[in-house]
Amino acid sequence: MRVSPPTLETERLLLRPLVEDDAEALHRTQSDPEHMRFYPHPFSRTETEQWIARTLSSYEARGFGLLAVEDGATGEFLGNVGPTIQHVDGVDEIELGWSITPARSRQGIATEAAIACRDWVFDAIGPDRVISLILPANEPSAGVARNLGMTVWKQTIFGSVQWLHDVWRSDAVAPRERASRVPGTSARSERSPRSTPT
Ligand SMILES: CC(C)(COP(=O)(O)OP(=O)(O)OC[C@H]1O[C@@H](n2cnc3c(N)ncnc32)[C@H](O)[C@@H]1OP(=O)(O)O)[C@@H](O)C(=O)NCCC(=O)NCCS
């Protein structure tokens, strides 16, 4: 079934498709060396623009990709979270990724956004599982995976610099079972993009 990148509401957040105009806000975070310590290097402005361009191409090709995360009350840009395709050990996997501004760290924002994305992926795309590729030293990211009920499945060498990653995994569960397993999962809805009158 063909899908389109969604707009999702959670208790505190609005998740929407990324647009080229997000480059400045996204780059403030992606150029921060401390925030990017688990990546090969902080991004240049061009790399941030390429990141958004790749996401827009993924929307075109697959109907999904990373989503912008906004504060639902203020509209402040907080980061990007969502599904991408990653080729892991010869298989195309749906990976959930997350990056949230350090200014709002440890407020449960990545967890809340990732739960909404995971639920959307299982409902709209219907894979058997989703994964997250996380460096063993990246404790904040592992914490998000743990909050989602994911567990480490295996390790793999991955990425442009061929680092060893933990492959965290969550298997598909029925919506009713999912809601009772993970607090807060029922507090989200899908709606049409903001520009559309409601
Ligand atoms: C990983 C990241 C998205 C977490 O965002 P966040 O909104 O702060 O995450 P949450 O508040 O939902 O925290 C989830 C869990 O992560 C862990 N965690 C978060 N920040 C942490 C920190 N600084 N130190 C240790 N654990 C941390 C905790 O277990 C936390 O759960 P808890 O608060 O219930 O104990 C954010 O730190 C980030 O963007 N990091 C840089 C980019 C990155 O590495 N992305 C992942 C690539 S795999």
Image: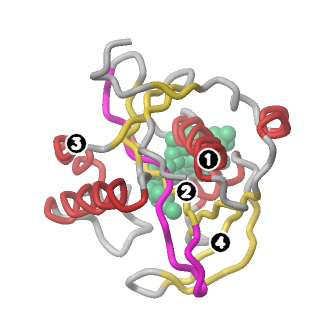
Query: Which residue is tagged 2?
Result: 96
Marks 2/1: CA distance? Answer: 7 Å
Mark 3 against mark 1, which lies toward the viewer? 1
Q: Secondary structure at mark 4?
A: strand
Q: Is residue 22 left or right of residue 123?
A: left
Q: Amino acid at mark 2?
A: Leu
Query: Which residue is tagged 3?
Result: 22
Please identify the dominant SS of the magenta region.
strand
Query: Which residue is tagged 4?
Result: 167
Marks 3/2: CA distance? Answer: 20 Å
Marks 3/4: CA distance? Answer: 29 Å
Assess disc 3: are there few (<14), some (14-19) or many (≥20) residues with their C-alpha within 10 Å of its C-alpha.
Answer: some
Mark 4 against mark 2, which lies toward the viewer? 2
Marks 4/2: CA distance? Answer: 11 Å
Residue 67, above or below 152: above
Q: Are marks 2 and 1 in contact (CB under 8 Å)?
A: yes
Q: Are marks 3 and 4 in contact (CB under 8 Å)?
A: no
Q: Amino acid at mark 3?
A: Asp
Assess disc 4: are there few (<14), some (14-19) or many (≥20) residues with their C-alpha within 10 Å of its C-alpha.
Answer: many
Residue 196, above or below 24: above
Please state the extent of the stretch shown in magenta in the rendering.
75-93
Q: Is residue 136 left or right of residue 161?
A: right
Q: Is residue 85 magenta?
A: yes
Residue placed at 48% from the left, 48% from the top? 3
Residue 86, above or below 126: below
In x, y percent, where is residue 99?
43, 50
In x, y percent, where is residue 130?
65, 60
